[in-house]
């Protein structure tokens, strides 16, 4: 189990977007609605996952174990490993709570994990796609780059994002 304090502080270290911070807070406190929790409240008829229809939809299933999501994470990990010298292999705990959250060199990866959760949660009726996710990342990093330039923080931006090709766009 990762360091709880590092996991809790991670979104405040890697992201400035309140939406991402709020989402991570809900995730680590297990308060994101799932079909399982909604069916227990008689809001949903079935606890089954809307994507695969096989398993009950828990947070772990929704974000890590659903077959379509597993393929998405495999693609994300392969993409990351082609961009960075660190050869990673994320397990469910690391996907949900951050990869080595106490190590600053993984802040970009952990920021991307936060963005991926929101992407997966928003698009529950669709099969997650690496290309769509990468387009979202490119858009977000371009925006962050422009804000950094405007605020004279480009060096700080570069220190965080230069490990990845899309940050140079």
Image (cartoon, grey):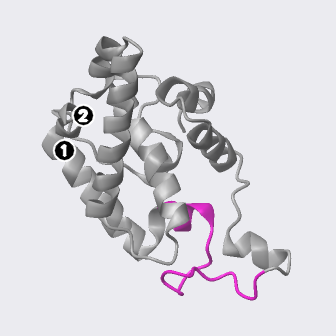
Residue drawn at the location 62% of the way across and 78% of the way down: 56
Task: Say which residue label 2 marks.
Answer: 167
Q: Is residue 94 visible?
A: no
Task: Tell whether 3 sits left or right of 129.
Answer: right
Given the current orientation, which residue lies at the most extreme right position?
41
Q: Which residues are magenta?
A: 44-63
Tag 1–tag 2 contact (CB < 8 Å): no
Given the current orientation, which residue lies at the most extreme front position?
150
Task: Tell whether 98 sits left or right of 162.
Answer: right
Q: Earlier in the sequence, mark 1 or mark 2?
A: 1
Dominant secondary structure (helix, strand or loop) of the stretch shown in magenta: loop
Q: Is residue 22 above or below residue 153?
A: below
Task: Tell whether 1 sits left or right of 127.
Answer: right
Question: Which numbered tag is attached to residue 81?
Answer: 1
Q: Quadrant of residue 144?
A: top left
> In the image, is residue 8 part of the stretch drawn in magenta?
no
Residue drawn at the location 63% of the way across and 49% of the way down: 27
């Amino acid at each position: 189990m990762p360091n709880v304090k590092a996991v809790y502080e991670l979104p405040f270290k890697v992201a400035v977007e309140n939406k991402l911070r709020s989402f991570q807070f809900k995730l680590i406190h297990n308060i994101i609605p799932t079909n399982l929790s909604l069916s227990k409240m008689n809001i949903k008829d079935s606890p089954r996952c809307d994507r695969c229809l096989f398993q009950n939809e828990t947070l772990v299933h929704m974000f890590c174990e659903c077959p379509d999501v597993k393929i998405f994470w495999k693609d994300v990990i392969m993409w990351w490993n082609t961009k960075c010298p660190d050869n990673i292999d994320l397990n469910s705990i690391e996907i949900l709570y951050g990869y080595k959250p106490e190590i600053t060199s993984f802040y970009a990866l952990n920021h991307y994990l936060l963005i991926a959760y929101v992407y997966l949660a928003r698009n529950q009726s669709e099969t997650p796609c690496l290309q769509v996710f990468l387009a979202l990342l490119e858009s977000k990093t371009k925006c962050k780059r422009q804000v950094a330039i405007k605020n004279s923080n480009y060096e700080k931006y570069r220190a965080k994002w230069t490990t990845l090709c899309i940050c140079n766009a």
